[in-house]
């Protein structure tokens, strides 16, 4: 299948542990941030999003934290499972626009 | 309900040739965006179509052009192919120009030799 994980930072996590994936963004005008998951051979899949007027948002097993002061975004995955193995991208978008700017991905490897 | 579909899955072309990639948006979606994803990198925005017009464009040369049809499907055309055009081309659709979630297709892997 398609490999999108070559030369990417890699995070190895034991199954059942929590994962934290970090991302720095550069555009202070961005007001909407998104985390995507991309499995081999597939397109990016939406995980969770957060607006710039928030600093935390929770989903099912996932939490996104936004620190606008230092332009930092993180994705926390609770009780990581083998099915979570993929490349994760943070992305940003300006207000009113749909053009999404993707950051550098992180490859998450879950060790059974 | 079919999601975003793209064709072909894989394509091999020679430098200088032209290629056309196709995308059918998710049912109920009328806005289509195209992205280029080089190996090991994040997708890069090429352009977006809504109401059969190009609405936004990323930093790509005029060799990259597109079209949207009345049924909302879209084509991406690349002329005078370069080796550097080898990538995964992703199509994403959404139900409008507003701040809606984009749904991505599986992509077309283009190899230029």
Image (spheres, helix red, strand yellow):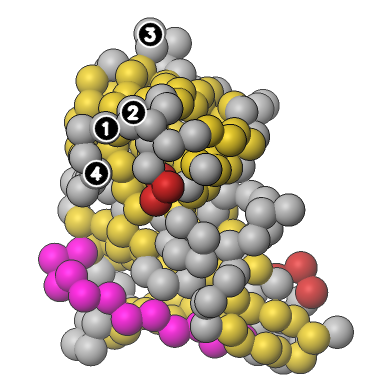
Q: Chain of mark 3?
A: B
Q: In the rendered structure, which disc, 1 or 2, sits on the residue that comes first in sequence?
A: 1
Residues indicated by labels 2 and 4 sit on the same polypeptide chain: yes
Q: Is residue B113 visible?
A: yes
Tell whether B6 sits left or right of B99. Answer: right
Q: Mark 4–mark 1 contact, CB under 8 Å?
A: yes
Tell whether A112 sits left or right of B82. Answer: right
Q: In the rendered structure, which disc, 1 or 3, sits on the residue that comes first in sequence?
A: 1
The disc placed on residue B70 is 3
* SS at badge 4: loop
Q: Residues within 10 Å of mark 4 (few under 14, many from 20)?
A: few
What segment carries the magenta color?
A19-30
Task: Choose mark 3 or mark 4, whichever is in front.
Answer: 4
C-alpha distance separating marks 4 and 1? 8 Å
Q: Mark 1–mark 2 contact, CB under 8 Å?
A: yes
Q: In the rendered structure, which disc, 2 or 4, sits on the residue that comes first in sequence?
A: 4
Name the residue tied to disc 2.
Answer: B79
Q: Residues within 10 Å of mark 2 (few under 14, many from 20)?
A: some
Name the residue tied to disc 1.
Answer: B63
Residues indicated by labels 1 and 2 sit on the same polypeptide chain: yes
* SS at badge 2: loop
Identify the residue shown where x is 39% and y is 51%.
B84
Q: In the rendered structure, which disc, 3 or 4, sits on the residue that comes first in sequence?
A: 4
Give percent across and percent down for residue B7: 59, 27
Q: Chain of mark 4?
A: B
Q: Residues within 10 Å of mark 1 (few under 14, many from 20)?
A: few
């Amino acid at each position: 299948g398609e490999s999108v994980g070559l030369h990417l930072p890699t995070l190895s996590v034991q199954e059942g542990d929590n994962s934290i994936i970090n991302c720095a963004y550069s555009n202070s005008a961005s007001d909407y941030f998104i985390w995507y998951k991309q499995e081999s051979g597939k397109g990016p899949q939406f995980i969770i999003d957060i607006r710039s007027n928030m600093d935390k948002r929770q989903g099912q097993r996932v939490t996104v934290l936004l620190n606008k002061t230092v332009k930092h975004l993180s994705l926390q995955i609770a009780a990581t499972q083998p099915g979570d193995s993929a490349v994760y991208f943070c992305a940003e978008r300006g207000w009113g626009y749909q053009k999404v700017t993707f950051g550098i991905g992180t490859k998450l490897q879950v060790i059974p | 309900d079919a999601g975003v579909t793209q064709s072909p899955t894989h394509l091999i072309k020679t430098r200088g040739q032209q290629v056309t990639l196709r995308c059918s948006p998710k049912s109920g979606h009328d806005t289509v965006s195209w992205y280029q994803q080089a190996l090991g990198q994040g997708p890069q925005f090429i352009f977006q179509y809504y109401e059969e017009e190009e609405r936004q464009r990323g930093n790509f040369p005029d060799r990259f052009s597109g079209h949207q049809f009345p049924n909302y499907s879209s084509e991406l055309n690349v002329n005078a192919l370069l080796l550097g055009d080898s990538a995964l081309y992703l199509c994403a659709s959404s139900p409008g120009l507003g701040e809606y979630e984009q749904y991505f297709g599986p992509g077309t892997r283009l190899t230029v030799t």
